[in-house]
Image (cartoon, helix red, strand yellow):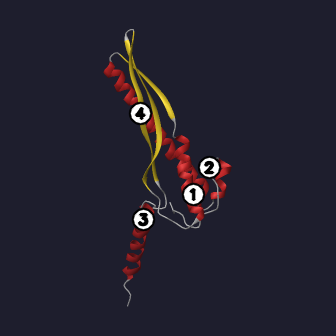
Amino acid sequence: MVSPHSNESDLVFSALVLAAVASAPCTLRPQLQLAPAVSHVRVVRASSSFTASASLTLSVRTIKKAAATSDAGLRVHVAGYYTIARSLAQVSSLRAIGSSQTQARARLGKAVAALVRDANTEYARQVRIYDNVTENGRTQGQGPSYGFPGGPNASVYCIQ
């Protein structure tokens, strides 16, 4: 005889497994970050204040590589993440003014941090749109219609 609770516990177990799979990070996506490299830092006294200036170069850093795959469509989709990140990696000139050298440098540091934060936020926003437009690679051919990379459709993809 089957217990009336066995179906209920099977459903609960299935729901837990599905929730775990859906919340697990997808290994088919790379984890990228725009990282700063600050150079040419100068602090100059100007009448009653100090001006700190620097060049900031954003580069693409791979935190975690995507899992290797033989699916050509997925490889193109993964390359799209790098294309998006590289489009945001740029060289910028920053300036900050302070009443002392220390204050000017501190403000310059805050400006660098804000620019890096904003660039990474924009990368995350564009990736969400890219994944939605291409359905995580299943409709990769739609990418160019929205300004994203295109290519063959993936038969292997992330469900999230």
| Quadrant holding the N terminus | bottom left
- Nearer the viewer's eye, disc 4 or disc 1? 4
Q: For the point 62% across and 52% down, which residue is it? A: 149
Q: Residue furthest right?
A: 145
Q: Secondary structure at mark 3?
A: helix
Between residue 65 and residue 140, name the one nearer to us.
Answer: 65
Dot 4 alpha-carbon crowd within 10 angstroms: few under 14, some 14 to 19, many 20 or more: some
For image coordinates 48% across by 39% down, the residue present is 119
Give the percent coordinates (x, y) of residue 134: 60, 56
Determine which residue is flagged by label 3: 19
Which quarter of the picture shows residue 21? bottom left
Which sits earlier in the primary sequence, circle 3 or circle 1?
3
**Separation of disc 3 and disc 4 at Cα?**
42 Å
- Left/right of residue 42 with respect to residue 90 in the rendered view: left
Q: Which mark is nearer the camera, 4 or 2?
A: 4
Q: Residue at x 59, y 58 (%)?
A: 76
Q: Please give the residue where the numbered disc 2 appears in the rendered image.
A: 148
Q: Amino acid at mark 2?
A: Phe
Looking at the image, is mark 4 or mark 1 earlier in the sequence? 4
Calculate the distance from the C-alpha at mark 4 to the C-alpha at mark 1: 31 Å
Looking at numbered disc 3 in the image, what kind of residue is underneath it?
Ala
Alpha carbon of mark 3 to alpha carbon of mark 2: how far? 30 Å
Q: Amino acid at mark 4?
A: Val
Horizontal and vertical percent for residue 50? 37, 16
Give me the disc on residue 38. 4
- CA gap, disc 1 and disc 2: 10 Å
